[in-house]
């Protein structure tokens, strides 16, 4: 925990820290507003909320571009265990907050429970993709984005088809909640393994274009 706090303090030296903090807050607020307005019946609000968890990963990862941080001898931890630990921790916190709201909505508006279940399952699946995506994107920027967008479109289409067939009326909301936590655990493990495999690969210049541009 002490190490995590130390790295959180170092995040202020990350690439475009203030700008990214603004985007983090905007995404979170949009997500909360969407969840409240739709009563948890759509996935977009919840997805925006959990999406903010990847910003911690980005903050720590971009520290590897700082000469001052690199000279401290913690370069390997910046690209391996710390971004994964912080991302995983925030993911659990954000997902738990989302679950508390979704379960409350299910009790207050039981008529929306099928929509709550299907949209939460969509969030779980996209959450898993985010873990994989963040493991690759800072090393293979363009390819990762293209694959993520294609997969996102494919899954969205598939979920809409399943909704039209009324498949989610047979799925329990509690089971989807449990599935979500399992997804986070597996996602964190896979994210760590990906980062470990790619540790020797140079960071993509496109991922932090501003840093490389300023260095020239």
Image: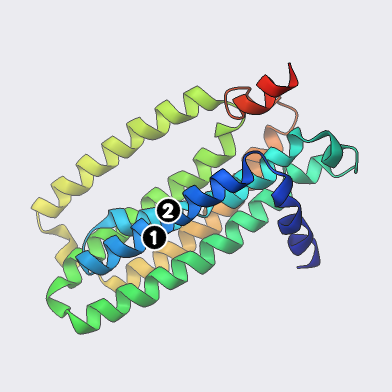
- Where is residue 119, by image quadrant? bottom left
Indicate the quadrant containing the C terminus: top left, top right, bottom left or bottom right: top right
Report whether residue 132 is seen: yes
Report whether residue 171 is seen: no
- Where is residue 203, by image quadrant? top right
**Can you identify the residue that label 1 sits on?**
29
Q: Dot 2, how many residues are within 10 Å of its Cα: few (below 14), some (14-19), or many (20+)?
A: some
Is the C-beta separation of discs 1 and 2 under 8 Å?
yes
Which residue lies at the image location 76% right of the left edge and 52% below the top edge? Answer: 10
Is 207 rendered above or below residue 187? above
**Can you identify the residue that label 2 sits on?**
26
Q: Is residue 111 left or right of residue 48?
A: left
- In the orientation shown, which residue stands out farthest toward the right? 72
Is 100 rendered above or below residue 176? below
- Real-space Cα distance between discs 1 and 2? 5 Å
Q: Where in the figure is residue 140, as x and y percent of width and height?
A: 57, 25
């Amino acid at each position: 925990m002490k190490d995590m706090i130390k790295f959180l303090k170092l995040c202020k030296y990350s690439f475009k820290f203030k700008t990214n903090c603004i985007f983090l807050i905007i995404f979170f607020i949009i997500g909360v507003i969407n969840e409240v307005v739709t009563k948890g019946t759509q996935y977009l609000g919840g997805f925006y909320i959990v999406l903010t968890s990847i910003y911690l990963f980005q903050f720590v990862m971009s520290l590897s571009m700082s000469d001052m941080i690199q000279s401290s001898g913690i370069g390997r931890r910046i690209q391996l265990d710390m971004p994964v630990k912080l991302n995983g921790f925030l993911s659990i916190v954000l997902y738990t907050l989302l679950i508390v709201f979704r379960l409350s909505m299910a009790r207050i508006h039981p008529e929306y429970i099928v929509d709550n279940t299907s949209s939460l399952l969509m969030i779980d699946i996209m959450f898993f993709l985010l873990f994989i995506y963040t493991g690759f994107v800072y090393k293979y920027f363009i390819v990762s984005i293209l694959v993520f967008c294609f997969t996102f479109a494919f899954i969205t289409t598939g979920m809409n088809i399943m909704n039209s067939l009324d498949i989610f009326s047979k799925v329990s909301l509690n089971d989807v909640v449990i599935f979500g936590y399992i997804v986070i655990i597996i996602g964190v493990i896979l994210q760590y393994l990906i980062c470990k495999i790619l540790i020797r690969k140079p960071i993509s210049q496109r991922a932090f274009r501003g840093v490389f541009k300023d260095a020239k």
